[in-house]
Image: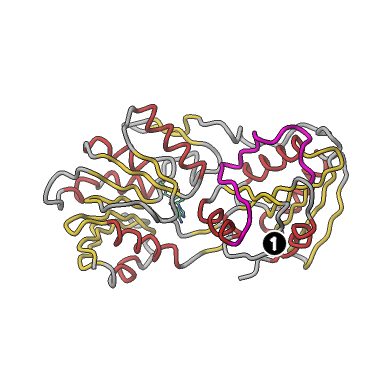
Amino acid sequence: MTDTAFSLLKPELDSASGIALWIADENLLNQTSRVNPDVTVISNRLDLCQQLESAGWHSLFSDFDFTAYADHSVDKILYRVSKEKPVVHHVINQAIRILKPGGKLCISGLKNEGIKTYLDKAKKLFAGQIEQSKSDKNTWMGILQSPGAPDTELLEDHDYTTLREVATDENFSYISKPGVYGWNKIDKGSAFLIAELPRFIERLPQKPETALDLGCGYGYLSLNCAPLGCRITATDNNAGALKACQENFRLRGIDAEVIAADCADGIAGRFPLILCNPPFHQGFGIEGDMTDRFLDATRNHLQADGIACFVVNLHIPLERKARKRFSTIETIADNGSFKLVLLAQPK
Ligand SMILES: C[S@@+](CC[C@H](N)C(=O)[O-])C[C@H]1O[C@@H](n2cnc3c(N)ncnc32)[C@H](O)[C@@H]1O
């Protein structure tokens, strides 16, 4: 589906020249645009970087890391706003640092994503220098011209780049940061899965030697699985999540591998144990096929005698979707909000 906010930005992307950056996140998956060789794409999503690279764009996969860009070195920045406010504020704050005086920040978004508030805040920071346009009553774009230095205090980005302790339970304290899924809390579904993990594990013929944490986020499932003594491979496609997960492992002395991958693509081998709390939202949209993709990845990475432990919201038809991929599908618990599903015998 065409994203109207991105459509509004496209002419600015097409005409960008000099040193230009396109800040792209998950909302832009499957959106197409003519390649502009002057533009470098920065994205925190590996799948988006791979998609744009194969279309001919030059892309950098990072947690929206702008440290390689010196102060006042960039001519133009293009940004269709992200879902999380700290990410948007981080990008706007960095824009004013790295744009040349007179350089332009073009931001677009929809009304229900808070674009008007973002434009108001950016306008103050950019000393009032803004040109606004809209393509319909919901879709807005602002082109801000850098005055060289911020005119007011920078926007609250919750210290975007810093990893910090965000949650504690009886087992661990967890390190995370803005930009990571559910960054400042323990996911209730994942906590339910861990509480019931022994019920899954008793179904294995022997102690698992390895485990795959599919969509690891900051590593909550991996950390809580580590006491089983298996070697863990944790994977995600979000740069911030991988950074946080790596740090949690380092702090706890867990010898595990953290791999950037799109739905475990390219990860070799099969595992006796797979843990997964799959995403079902993608950016501002809801992508029905995310569950299918995670189920496919599980089928492709599960050992013949292994088990996969999934937690999903009750309304997700995981069992039905799993039927063509696994011979054993059992809902082993539900707590009124989430259900735990055991998958085995990949077809
Ligand atoms: C519901 S969260 C679970 C996070 C973590 N396992 C936990 O329990 O807190 C889903 C995770 O899947 C990741 N994800 C989304 N799409 C992905 C993809 N295509 N490939 C790999 N990971 C993905 C997200 O970045 C997010 O960290």
Type of colouring: secondary structure
Give percent across and percent down for residue 253: 33, 27
Q: State whether the magenta stretch is mostly helix, strand or loop.
A: loop
Q: Check residue 328 for magenta coloring.
A: no
Residue 144 screen position, x and y as percent: 82, 47
Residue 252 x, y percent position in the rendering: 35, 28
Say which residue appears at 34% left-offset and 52% top-offset: 276
Residue pictured at 23% horizontal, 64% vertical? 346
Span of residues in magenta: 55-75
Which residue is pictured at 39% across the width and 59% down the height? 313
Residue that mark 1 sits on: 6
Residue 74 covered by magenta stretch = yes
From the viewer's perspective, is 307 left or right of 222?
left
**Image quarter hosting the N terminus:** bottom right
- Image-quadrant location for residue 224: top left
Split into 4 quadrants, where in the image is the C terminus? bottom left
Query: Left of 327 or right of it: where is 16?
Result: right
**Which amino acid type is shown beneath numbered disc 1?**
Phe
- Disc 1 crowd, CA 10 A, few/some/many (<14, 14-19, 20+): many
Instruction: Classify 69 as above or below 323.
Output: above
Residue shown at the point (29%, 56%) measured from the top left:
301
Left-right relation of 79 to 219: right
Give the secondary structure at mark 1: helix
